[in-house]
Image (tube, helix red, strand yellow):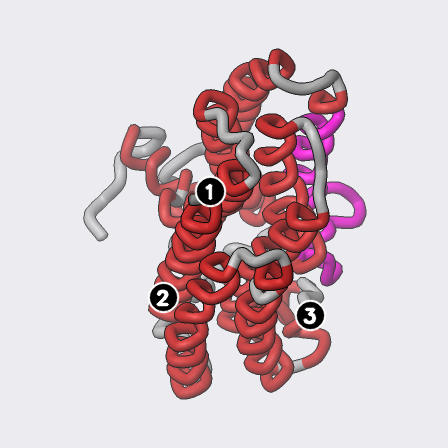
């Protein structure tokens, strides 16, 4: 990679990690499609949810970048994409300002949702901000103690899917619960790939992810089963006659299994970054298939 000027626009774009935004947008897409299926679609609150989710994802990336650097986790043996602070592209002081500015903008935009739903959204927003920090920082950083997967299911499943649906429909249904669980499990495949790739470095750094705790074979099986379970949970929608929503996501299984096979074959090293890209692609495909299925079910 050519030299990146310190604190430049390019440096900030790299630190934002745009490829991770699929994890922020997919839940909003699913929540909006579900609202459409139930006859509650409203485009403006859906757009606000997408902007808030995207900005909070960027803020979380900045927070992880800064505090992993301060902890010394991002070392020369890092296998994942290069981090801005560790590479010297952004100074820690500038990153702190970037974190504050991004969170402030996210909260400012998200506050417009109060016109569509109740004051309780303020609490949801505050919890999102709090856990964005607690994930990496504090006396008990959650990602370092094996809680990352559970947090993904909550903050990439129930909060964004349920929240997006709620600001449009002002209610919660069993379908919302299932869709939230599906989305959280789906996006957790992305975290598992990261943790599988970094298992040796994480163990040296004292980062006790589930893959570090239970081993390489567990990581392989966990990745496979998460994707299969997410697809099979979609069959719930067939109970209520939403066949497209139940069946279209099953196409994802083919791509997920093929990616899993390649992950097992690669086994270790930087080549696993290609599996990260494939997982992100598969995840977005799943979200699109499920959303299309829900919209078709509404017709």
Alpha carbon distance from label 2 to label 1? 19 Å
Please give the residue where the numbered disc 1 appears in the rendered image: 29
Is 141 inside the magenta-drawn segment?
A: yes
Lateral position of residue 141 relative to residue 75, left or right: right
Q: Secondary structure at mark 2?
A: helix
Please give the residue where the numbered disc 2 appears in the rendered image: 278
Q: Residue furthest right?
A: 139
Q: Are marks 2 and 3 in contact (CB under 8 Å)?
A: no
Camera-nearest residue between 239 and 173: 239
For the point 73% across and 32% down, the residue is 127
Q: Is residue 264 above or below residue 79?
A: below
Work out whether mark 1 precedes mark 3 in sequence or the reverse, and give the earlier one: 1
- Residue 142 in percent (x, y) is at 73, 52
Please give the residue where the numbered disc 3 appears in the rendered image: 210
Mark nearest the camera among 1 and 3 is 1
- Residue 109 in sight from this viewpoint: yes
Is 45 inside the magenta-drawn segment?
A: no
- Residue 164 in percent (x, y) is at 58, 34
């Amino acid at each position: 990679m050519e030299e990146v000027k310190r604190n430049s626009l390019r440096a900030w774009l790299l630190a934002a990690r745009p490829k991770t935004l699929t994890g922020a947008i997919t839940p909003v897409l699913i929540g909006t499609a579900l609202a459409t299926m139930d006859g509650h679609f409203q485009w403006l609150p859906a757009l606000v949810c997408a902007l808030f989710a995207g900005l909070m994802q960027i803020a979380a990336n900045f927070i992880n970048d800064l505090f992993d650097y301060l902890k010394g986790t991002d070392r020369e043996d890092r296998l994942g994409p290069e981090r801005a602070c560790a590479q010297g592209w952004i100074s820690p002081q500038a990153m702190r300002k970037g974190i504050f500015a991004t969170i402030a903008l996210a909260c400012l935009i998200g506050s417009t949702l109060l016109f569509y739903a109740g004051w309780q959204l303020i609490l949801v927003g505050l919890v999102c901000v709090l856990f964005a920090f607690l994930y990496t920082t504090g006396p008990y950083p959650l990602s370092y103690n094996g809680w990352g997967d559970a947090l993904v299911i909550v903050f990439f499943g129930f909060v964004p899917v349920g929240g997006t649906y709620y600001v449009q429909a002002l209610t919660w249904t069993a379908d919302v619960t299932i869709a939230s669980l599906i989305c959280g499990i789906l996006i957790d495949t992305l975290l598992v790939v990261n943790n599988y790739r970094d298992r040796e470095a994480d163990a040296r750094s004292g980062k006790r992810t589930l893959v570090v705790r239970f081993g390489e074979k567990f990581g392989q099986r966990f990745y496979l089963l998460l994707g299969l379970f997410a697809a099979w949970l979609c069959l719930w929608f067939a109970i209520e006659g939403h066949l497209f929503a139940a069946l279209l996501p099953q196409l994802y299984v083919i791509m997920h299994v093929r990616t899993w096979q390649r992950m097992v074959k690669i086994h270790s090293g930087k080549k696993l970054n290609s599996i990260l890209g494939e997982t992100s692609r598969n995840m977005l495909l799943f979200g699109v298939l499920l959303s299309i299925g829900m919209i078709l079910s509404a017709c």
